Image (cartoon, rainbow, N blue to C red):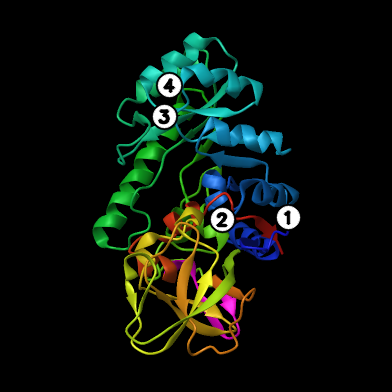
């Protein structure tokens, strides 16, 4: 099947390599990258991305679930794969079989891992203030006991919850989280426990707190050349990061609509003049948000074609009245560049009232990912 026949995603691996070089420059000496390739590498294609990262010398990866880790192993990815989320005890066998490293989500879970008797490596998550996963940082003794339980603890980590914010309150809270985490790692080393990797920073932790230094860092959304919001400004300028992903679709056909006529579901679009509508072969089943209806535009031949009416499951309508060159089988750019115009993921997210992370991670499986 022709991969560019309907709708597809193009992944620029050269730009990914540029972004890897950027993070290697800004990370403290001795701090290695442990990229987040969860949610299909934020919609970019986990196999494609992890394979390229592996070729660039990266051997540590983060995923959300055991299933994601298994898929990477089956795709030939080596090194450490850390499962950041919960794995049901019935799936502990997968952790052992596929040599995955599991997060200890709390003290009770540590007991379940111990009781399983499986020789699985684990990282201890520490809750330093986000109140999501992890053992409470105040209970230092319980964290130290993980080693005495006989668990194969190879890492300790936490997560910064407001590192993307630049307000005084957000920066104070983040500094407090960093101090709490350092207190835990110092306590462990003081107890003679030294053979573990400590990691704390995600994308915004790296970009906004460059003085924070641990063994590893977990770049996620920014590794793909994207920030969560268009208005975000980081302490380390992110201008050298390159967007890796482009989203494109074919024009299936073109319809003529007279002034006053409606089009699409609910006839939500009503022509204010005689209008040409292009039917694009992508819809909400491909991850195009339904709330894009009547907002934003796509690019055709380097010109803007406004979204018209509701997003359908498999198609969407755009107004090409002012683009006479638009024709069936032509290419439309939903995210990316065409001519001198560009639509970023951040701009797309702003149109739909969400963050860029959600936009890319919800792009559908039936969109082939094509390396360019």
Q: Which residue is outermost to the left? A: 169
Disc 2 versus disc 4: distance between alpha carbons? 28 Å
Picture coordinates of residue 216 (x, y %)?
A: 55, 44
Q: Residue at x 50, y 68 (%)?
A: 238
Mark 3 residue element: helix
Disc 4 versus disc 1: distance between alpha carbons? 55 Å
Q: Tag on residue 250?
A: none
Mark nearest the camera among 4 and 1 is 1
Mark 4 residue element: helix
Q: Nearer the viewer, residue 114 or 171?
A: 114
Picture coordinates of residue 210 (x, y %)?
A: 48, 58
Q: Tag on residue 1?
A: 1
From which residue to which does the magenta span run? 337-346
Disc 2 versus disc 3: distance between alpha carbons? 24 Å
Disc 4 versus disc 3: distance between alpha carbons? 8 Å
Q: Tag on residue 187?
A: 3
Q: Residue at x 43, y 21 (%)?
A: 144
Disc 2 versus disc 1: distance between alpha carbons? 42 Å
| Vertical side of 121 occupied by 350: above or below | below
Q: Tag on residue 27?
A: 2
Would you call the spot at circle 1 few (<14 residues within 10 Å), some (14-19), or many (20 or more)? few
- Circles 2 and 3: CB atoms closer than 8 Å: no
Q: Tag on residue 144?
A: 4
Q: Nearer the viewer, residue 366 or 146?
A: 366
Picture coordinates of residue 251 (x, y %)?
A: 58, 72
Mark before the other along the chain sequence, 4 or 1: 1
């Amino acid at each position: 099947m022709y991969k560019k026949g309907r709708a597809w995603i193009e992944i620029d691996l050269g730009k990914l390599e540029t972004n890897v070089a950027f993070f290697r420059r800004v990370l403290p000496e001795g701090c290695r990258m442990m990229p987040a390739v969860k949610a299909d590498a934020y919609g970019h294609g986990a196999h494609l991305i992890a394979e390229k990262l592996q070729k660039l010398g990266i051997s540590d990866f983060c995923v959300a679930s055991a299933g994601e880790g298994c898929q990477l192993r089956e795709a030939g990815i080596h090194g450490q794969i850390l499962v950041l989320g919960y794995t049901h005890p019935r799936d502990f066998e997968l952790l052992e079989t596929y040599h995955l490293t599991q997060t200890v989500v709390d003290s009770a879970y540590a007991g379940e891992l111990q009781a399983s008797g499986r020789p699985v490596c684990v990282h201890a998550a520490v809750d330093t203030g986000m109140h999501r996963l992890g053992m409470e940082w105040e209970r230092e003794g319980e964290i130290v006991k993980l080693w005495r339980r006989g668990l194969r603890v190879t890492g300790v980590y936490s997560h910064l919850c407001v590192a993307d914010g630049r307000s005084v309150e957000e920066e104070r809270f983040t500094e407090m989280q960093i101090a709490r985490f350092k207190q835990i790692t110092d306590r462990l080393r003081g107890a003679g426990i030294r053979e573990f990797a400590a990691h704390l920073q995600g994308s915004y932790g790296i970009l906004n707190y460059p003085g924070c230094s641990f063994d590893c860092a977990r770049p996620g959304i920014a590794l793909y050349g994207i920030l969560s919001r268009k208005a975000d400004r980081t302490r380390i300028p992110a201008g050298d990061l390159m967007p890796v992903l482009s989203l494109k679709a074919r024009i299936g056909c073109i319809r003529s609509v007279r002034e006053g006529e409606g089009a699409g579901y609910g006839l939500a679009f009503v022509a204010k003049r005689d209008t040409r509508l292009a039917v694009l072969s992508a819809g909400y089943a491909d991850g195009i948000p339904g709330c894009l209806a009547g907002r934003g535009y796509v690019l055709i031949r380097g010109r803007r074609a406004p979204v018209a009416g509701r997003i359908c499951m498999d198609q969407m309508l755009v107004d090409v009245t002012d683009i006479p060159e638009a024709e069936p089988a032509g290419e439309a750019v939903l995210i990316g560049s065409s001519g001198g115009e560009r639509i970023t993921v951040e701009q797309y997210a702003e149109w739909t009232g969400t963050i860029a992370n959600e936009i890319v991670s919800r792009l559908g499986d039936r969109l082939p990912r094509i390396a360019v």
